[in-house]
Image (cartoon, grey):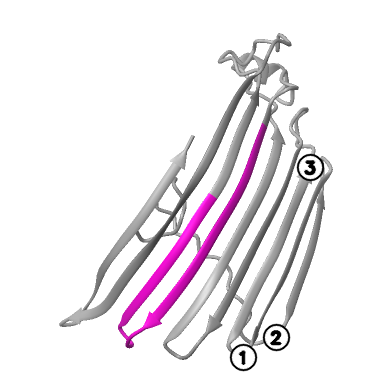
Amino acid sequence: MQYGTQFGGLVNFIMKKPNKTKKMELIHRNTFGSNELYTNFTSISGSIKKFSYLSFINFKQGDGFRPNSGFESINTYNYFKYKINNKLWLSTEFTYLNYIAQQAGGLSDQMFSEDHFQSNRSRNWFQVNWMLYNLHINFKASSTKTISFNLFGLDAKRDALGFRTNRVSQVDSGDERDLIKGDFNNYGFELKYLNRYKIKSKKSNMLLGAKFYKSDNT
């Protein structure tokens, strides 16, 4: 109930927030490394009166330190917030991730001793396509009481393709590969009432809420 859209457990992802002191802040970083590694991070952020925003794009590519282990990914995040008054604000978020990587395959103990950089898988691939949506409305009834409404959705795909025998030392026969396709679609909304109070000097919290969640995972 506490955290967002993810279906993999209770992890609270705290994202970077907009710059409150500037109308526009631009950050641009490029990184180069061995094995043809290149990464780029570019973000734009700022606050204009009651409106604040943050957008970034992160691109990565490289060949990996073993044969057949190249990868490429692009990730973008967009956050917009509008403060209606001192008690009420709303925000929207959109996250997109596309990732494809060649899988070099595992190594047995003997293979590792012979050459820990080797790979006997050249047709194994893994791909993820991930989109997250969120609308958040927050009302601060008092200094200790908060009411919030959260509407969220996920549209994601995960594909694994390759020669996937359990014996990692077995050479790829060149026959048909296994294809495992995962399709994840879920959405929901939640309404929460949070009250912070003290019992004598002990800080305490009371949380009441309701949540609707519909999942269609194949």
Which residues are drawn in magenta?
126-154
Mark 1: amino acid: Lys
Q: Residues within 10 Å of mark 1 (few under 14, many from 20)?
A: few
Marks 1 and 3, how far apart at CA: 41 Å
The quadrant in which residue 162 appears is: top right
For residue 145: magenta? yes
Q: Report the disc number at residue 23.
A: 2
The quadrant in which residue 178 appears is: top right
Quadrant assignment for the N terminus? bottom left
Marks 2 and 1, how far apart at CA: 9 Å
- The residue indicated by pointer 1 is 49
Q: Nearer the viewer, residue 107 or 12?
A: 12
Q: Nearer the viewer, residue 190 or 27?
A: 190
162 versus 11 height, above or below: above
Q: Please tell me whether mark 2 sits on a helix, a strand or a loop.
A: loop
Marks 2 and 3, how far apart at CA: 35 Å
Residue sitting at 63 percent across and 76 percent down?
53
Magenta highlight: main SS: strand
Q: Please tell me whether mark 3 sits on a helix, a strand or a loop.
A: strand
Mark 3: amino acid: Gly
Q: In the rendered structure, which disc, 2 or 1, sits on the residue that comes first in sequence?
A: 2
Residue sitting at 61 percent across and 18 percent down?
164
Residue sitting at 60 percent across and 84 percent down?
51
- The residue indicated by pointer 3 is 62
Report x, y in % for residue 115.
73, 20
